[in-house]
Amino acid sequence: MKEKKDRKEIGLAVVGSGAIGKIRAAFARDYPGVGWIGICDINESLAKKLAEETKADFYTTDYKELLKRREINAAIISTDENNHVEPILAAVEQGHRLFIEKPLATNVKDSRMVYEAIKESGVDAVMGYTNRFRRRFLTIKERLRTGEIGEITTVTTRAFMNRMVPIATLRRTELKGNLQPMVVSGTHSLDMSLWLMEGKEPSEIYARSIDKALGHIGTKDATFGIFTMNDGTLWSMNISWALPIVWPGAVYGLEIGIVGTQGVITIDDTHRDLVLASEKPQWAGYRPEGYKPEFERHVEFLTSFPPGDMAFGQLWGPMREETNSWFARLYTGMDTPHATAWDGHRNLVLTMAMCLSADRGTPIKLPIDEEEFYK
Ligand SMILES: NC(=O)c1ccc[n+]([C@@H]2O[C@H](COP(=O)([O-])OP(=O)(O)OC[C@H]3O[C@@H](n4cnc5c(N)ncnc54)[C@H](O)[C@@H]3O)[C@@H](O)[C@H]2O)c1
């Protein structure tokens, strides 16, 4: 931790003023260690509105102009998935500490290039794997660290998602190629599983996909895979992101089972413990702007939106803890469990290796030669 006299105010750039940029900028406004705030979005009205809401010092549509400002020493890159690379590189060039929304990039070459640039510059860069900041996962991580279940032998990870998420994600871009369930959303449960299994490295993946429900919008419905780890641990990892709009889990539901030589841990993170049923349609958890779902949903498992939930005009939940912990990391030097840029690159490569194995119909040895993705 830094001595009080060594703490220096954070001068923050928020690049991307959409759903997530808005949430994080609001926390910045309230964090005592944040001084100057600059906001950017290519959509000027969004940038202006967020700047007004957060009483920011400056706004622009040009991230280069913002990142070059002398007041800035840290940046949040919260642009949409296909637009992370350029602002990250511009921030690295200026030596700013970084908080980057996942994924690092949407293809392996860009992701590697961005990761190497970060590594070479030595800037402290973390990534938004928000689940790591939830009390339930932190307590399990601690039990695994202290060896309560002995040595892990098998892990099963099942992610269920409402198809509203892929429909909303794919409709905002023409670059749909890599917007597959594992790459965009399975990456969260993959990161969690690997974090819980820390120290084990995947040595093979064998996966399969199906696209009967969402093939027409340019993505797969589900990907199922089995990883073999370098010590023989077996890990079954799957995601289905084509659950119907009427499925009560509005966004993300997760089940993980971890079996060890001396114990077991099961995690029910499906949100079935908080059920709301109403004659009124329910979209409180998640409803992308301008998107009109074809069906009404009247039953909702509350708290399935990973960032958290709105109450009294503010977001409460893991994204608050994650963002404020990052500010503390910068301001007080606190040690935090954020995912690193390397975790982000590794997660992209592994999720894409699952897609490649499914496309080829063959197992793939890991670590993979990254050129394989371009053959
Ligand atoms: N950690 C989580 O739980 C979580 C949840 C949802 C989304 N995300 C991630 O957060 C990121 C943003 O998602 P979102 O839902 O806020 O998207 P969004 O589409 O609502 O917002 C993205 C914004 O970035 C702007 N933008 C694009 N290119 C830009 C550029 N070059 N310069 C400035 N602005 C630019 C767009 O105009 C848009 O307003 C994505 O990477 C997504 O995967 C994380």
Image (cartoon, helix red, strand yellow):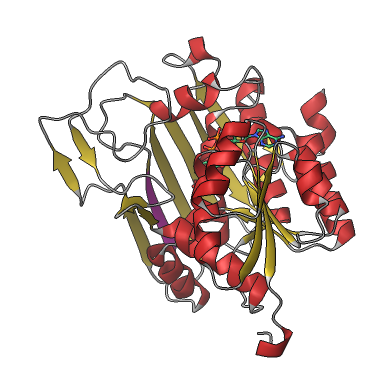
Question: As rendered, which of 250 and 21 lies closer to the eye?
Answer: 21
Quadrant where the image shows the C terminus: top right
Q: Residue at x 53, y 47 (%)?
A: 52
Q: Let me know if residue 82 is in the magenta part.
A: no
Residue 72: image x %, image y %?
Answer: 75, 59
Residue 61: image x %, image y %?
Answer: 70, 36
Q: Residue at x 53, y 61 (%)?
A: 29
Q: What range of the chain is rendered magenta?
A: 253-260
Looking at the image, is 176 positioned above or below residue 64? above
Question: As rendered, which of 64 and 372 lies closer to the eye?
Answer: 64
In the shown orientation, is residue 54 left or right of residue 255?
Answer: right
Q: Quadrant of residue 316?
A: bottom left
Image quarter where ligand 1 lies: top right
Question: As rendered, which of 241 and 174 lies closer to the eye?
Answer: 174
Judged by its main secondary structure, the magenta piece is: strand
Q: Quadrant of residue 292?
A: top left
Residue 259: image x %, image y %?
Answer: 42, 60
Looking at the image, is 214 positioned above or below residue 48? above
